[in-house]
Image: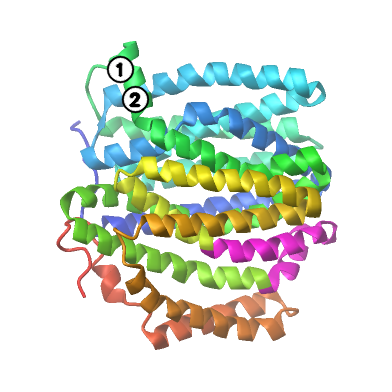
Amino acid sequence: MGLRSTSRSPGSFFRNSVLLVGIELASKVFGLVFFIVMARYLGAGELGGYAFAMGVANFFVIAPRFGFEKMAQREIGRMGHLPRSTFLELTAVKAGISIPAMAALALSLWMFSPGQAWTGLVVGAFVFAYAYLEFLNAIFRGLQRAEYEVASRSLFSTLNLLIGVAILQQGGKVPAVALGQTACVAAAVAMSFHFLGPFVEKSRPDYRWSRLVEHVRKAAPLGGVLVAIYFSNQMGILALGTLAGDREAGYFAAAMRIFDNLTLLAAAVMGAFLPRASELHQESREGFSRAAEFVMRQAVLLAMPMGVALVLLAEPIVLLLYGTGFAPAIPCLRILGLTLIFSYWNYVADSILIAADREGLLFRITCAAALIHVASSLGLVHLHSHVGAALSVLATQMVYAILLSAALRDTVSLRRLGAVLWKPVAASLAMGGLLYPLRHHSLLLVTPLGGAVYLGVLLATGALDFREWRGLGLASGRKVLRK
C-alpha cells in the first residue's frame, strides 16, 4: 500500500473547519453532560476537589506537552507528511519527560496532601494519557485529516460518558471516574495509531541526545507559551482551592465549564487554520494578512451573540444545567460571557503569531498576561471568592487582547477590521434588546428567537459574504480572498 497523502485541495480549510467544529461541538456537549451528571451526583464540594486535582495535574503535564502539539501541527502542515523518525523521536521525548513528571506529581501529593494522594494520582494518570491523545490529534490536524481526529475523539467522548455515568450510578467517586476516563483515552489512542499508519513515511529514528534536545529546543517557545497559558487558565481554580475552599472552586468550575464549551468554535477553526496559515505565510504575505483578517472577523461574528446570551441568560442556564445548588455560579457566568468575546479574538491572534514564526513575541505577551492573571486572581479571590476568580479571567483576557492587537499591527489592518466589526455589534445589540425582556421565559423559545434576530441583522447589513467563504481555499497565496 502506498503512502497516503494529505488533503491540500482548495476547499480543505473549509472542510476541516466544518469537521473540527462538528467534533468540538459533539465532544463538548458529551463532556458537558458528563460534567453536569458529576455535579448532580457529587455536589459542589467533590466537584471542586476534582477540578482542583485536574488543575494540579495539568501543572505537571506541562513538561511532557511543552508545545509539541503546536510544533507538530505547524511543521507537519508545512511538510505535508509524517516522517516515522519524527513521530517516534517526539514520542520518546514525551515519554522520557512524562515519567519523571508523574513521579514529581506523586511525591508532591504525598508530601503536601497525603489524604488526597490516591485521587490526585488517578486524575493525573488520566491527564497525562489525554495529553498524548491531544498530541496525536495535533498530528491529524497537521496532516489536514480532521476526519480521523473526529473518529478518535468521538470514541473517547462516547465511552467517557457511558462508562462515567455507569460508575456514578453505582456510587463511584472521583478516583473510579478518573480510572474509567484513563481507559477511554487508551481506546482512543489505539484507534489513532491505526489511523496514522498509512500516513507515516518510513525513515530511521535518531535517538541520540543531541537530536532529542533539538526537538525540545524547537518546541521551547511554544512550551513557554503553554506554561503561561496554564497559569492564565488554572490559577482561578488553584487560588480558590487554596484560599476559599472546594465548594467555591466548584461554583467557579461549573461556570468555567460552560465558558470552555463555548470556545469550541474558535479552537476548532484555529485547528484547521494554523497548518494552512503556516503554509500560506511562506507563499504570500499579502494573502496571509487577508486570510488572518477574514478569520478574525468571523471569530468576532461568532463570539458576540454567545457572549451577549450568557450575560442575559446566565440565571436560567445555570439553574437548568446544575440546579439551584449552583446558583452562586450565576454571576461568574455573566462575567465570563463578556470574557468570551476577548477569548475568541485571542484564539485567532495566537494562531496568527505562531503561523508567522513569532513564538518568541507570543511567549513574552502570554507571560505578561499570566503574571497579571496570577496577581489579580490572588487579590480578587481573597476579596470576592469565586466571583473574583471570574473577574480575574475577564481582566486578563482584556489585557491579553490589547497586547496581541498591538503585536499584529504589521500583519492585519485594525482599521479595516474596525470598519466592518460594527455589524456584529449592531446585530448583538438587537438580539440583546429582544432577549432582555424575555430572559425569564423558556430557553427553548428565547434562544432560537435571539439567534434569528442576530442572523437577520447580519444578513441585512451584508456581514455574511458567502462568496468570501468560498474563496477561502488557502491553497495558494494569490487566491485566498478576492474582493
**Callout 2–callout 1 Cβ contact below 8 Å:** yes
Residue on which disc 1 sits: 211
Q: Residue furthest bottom?
A: 460
**Which residue is at 78% across, 37% downward?**
242
Q: Is residue 323 magenta?
A: yes
Give the quarter of the figure containing the N terminus.
Answer: top left
In the image, residue 311 sits, relative to residue 68, either above or below, namely below
Residue 70 in picture, x, y percent from top left = 39, 39
Q: Describe the element under mark 1 as helix, strand or loop.
A: helix
Res 222 → quadrant: top left
Determine the residue positioned at 38% across, 78% down: 420
Q: Which residues are magenta?
A: 312-341
In magenta stretch: residue 451: no
Q: Is residue 240 above or below residue 201?
A: below
Residue 391 drawn at (x, y percent): 68, 58
Q: Secondary structure at mark 2?
A: helix
Crowd tier of the residue under label 1, counting other residues whose Cα lies within 10 Å: few below 14, some 14–19, many 20 or above? few
Residue 20 shows in the view: no
Q: CA distance from mark 2 to mark 1?
A: 7 Å
Q: Which residue is mark 2?
A: 215
Residue 199's label in the rendered image is none
Q: How many discs mark residues in the rendered view?
A: 2
Quarter occupied by residue 291? bottom left
**Residue 124 percent location from the top left of the image:** 63, 28
- Looking at the picture, tell me which residue is in the foreground, 240 or 50: 240
What amino acid is labelled 1 in the image? Answer: Arg
What secondary structure is the magenta-colored segment mainly?
helix
Instruction: Name the amino acid, label 2.
Output: His
Q: Mark 2 Cα within 10 Å, few/some/many (few <14, many 20+)?
A: some
